[in-house]
Image (cartoon, rainbow, N blue to C red):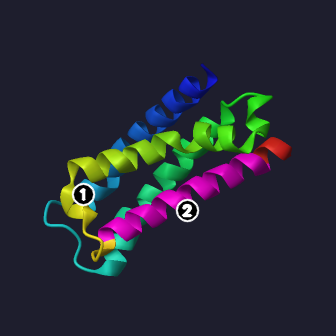
């Protein structure tokens, strides 16, 4: 039951953060035509997504209680399941992202890995202090 609570918190934080990112940043600045360059894609799409993944991972990790948070595999599953599930959902809904030669798959996977790592690190820093 503790994993389900962590996953629920992660999903809620991820949905709220992505909604705010989409309505406040993506739609006004990027629009339906997309970005014009790699730098713009990183600044306006991938970095805000990184922040969303970090927040979701951190929130899910924060609600994971003792003594289970000291089991690394269990804590990793509790904290990172929501962002990983969102990534898998994205890949299922947008098969054009599955192009292994295109940058979209690799950038979104890099954002997922980096966001989960930073969220877990942030949790560890706050938990031990």
* Residue at the image position 45 percent from the left and 47 percent from the top: 84
Q: Where is residue 23 shown, x and y percent of the image?
A: 29, 47
Read off the residue under disc 1. Answer: 28
Q: Where is residue 56 shown, x and y percent of the image?
A: 52, 43
Question: Of the numbered discs in the image, which one, if any, rests on residue 8?
Answer: none
Is 123 inside the magenta-drawn segment? yes
* Residue at the image position 66 percent from the left and 30 percent from the top: 63
The magenta stretch is 104-125
Question: Between residues 34 and 101, which one lies in front from this camera angle?
Answer: 101
First of labels 2, 1 by sequence position:
1
Q: Where is residue 81 shown, x and y percent of the image?
A: 51, 41
Instruction: Measure the C-alpha gap from mark 2 to mark 1.
Output: 26 Å
Q: Can residue 30 be seen in this view?
A: no
Q: Can residue 52 be seen in this view?
A: yes
**In the picture, residue 31 is in which quadrant?**
bottom left
Q: Is the magenta stretch mostly helix, strand or loop?
A: helix
Number of labels in the image equals 2
Q: In this view, does 52 lie to the left or right of 93?
A: right
Question: Measured along the vertical axis of the image, is residue 21 above or below residue 102?
Answer: above
Q: Which of marks 2 and 1 is in front?
A: 2
Question: Between residues 50 and 82, which one lies in front from this camera angle?
Answer: 82
Q: Are marks 2 and 1 in contact (CB under 8 Å)?
A: no
Q: Is residue 122 left or right of residue 88?
A: right
Secondary structure, mark 1, is helix
Is 56 inside the magenta-drawn segment? no
Secondary structure, mark 2, is helix
Question: Measured along the vertical axis of the image, is residue 41 above or below residue 54?
Answer: below
Question: Measured along the vertical axis of the image, is residue 95 above or below residue 85?
Answer: below
Question: Of the numbered discs in the image, which one, if any, rests on residue 114?
Answer: 2
């Amino acid at each position: 039951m503790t994993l389900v609570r962590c996953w629920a918190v992660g999903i809620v934080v991820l949905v709220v953060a992505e909604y705010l990112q989409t309505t406040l940043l993506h739609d006004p600045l990027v629009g339906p035509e997309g970005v014009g360059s790699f730098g713009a894609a990183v600044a306006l799409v991938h970095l805000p997504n990184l922040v969303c993944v970090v927040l979701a991972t951190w929130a899910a990790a924060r609600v994971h209680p003792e003594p289970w948070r000291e089991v690394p595999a269990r804590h990793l599953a509790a904290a990172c399941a929501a962002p990983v599930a969102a990534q898998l959902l994205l890949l299922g809904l947008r098969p054009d992202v599955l192009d292994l030669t295109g940058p979209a798959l690799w950038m979104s996977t890099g954002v997922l890995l980096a966001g989960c790592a930073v969220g877990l690190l942030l949790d560890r820093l706050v938990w031990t202090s």
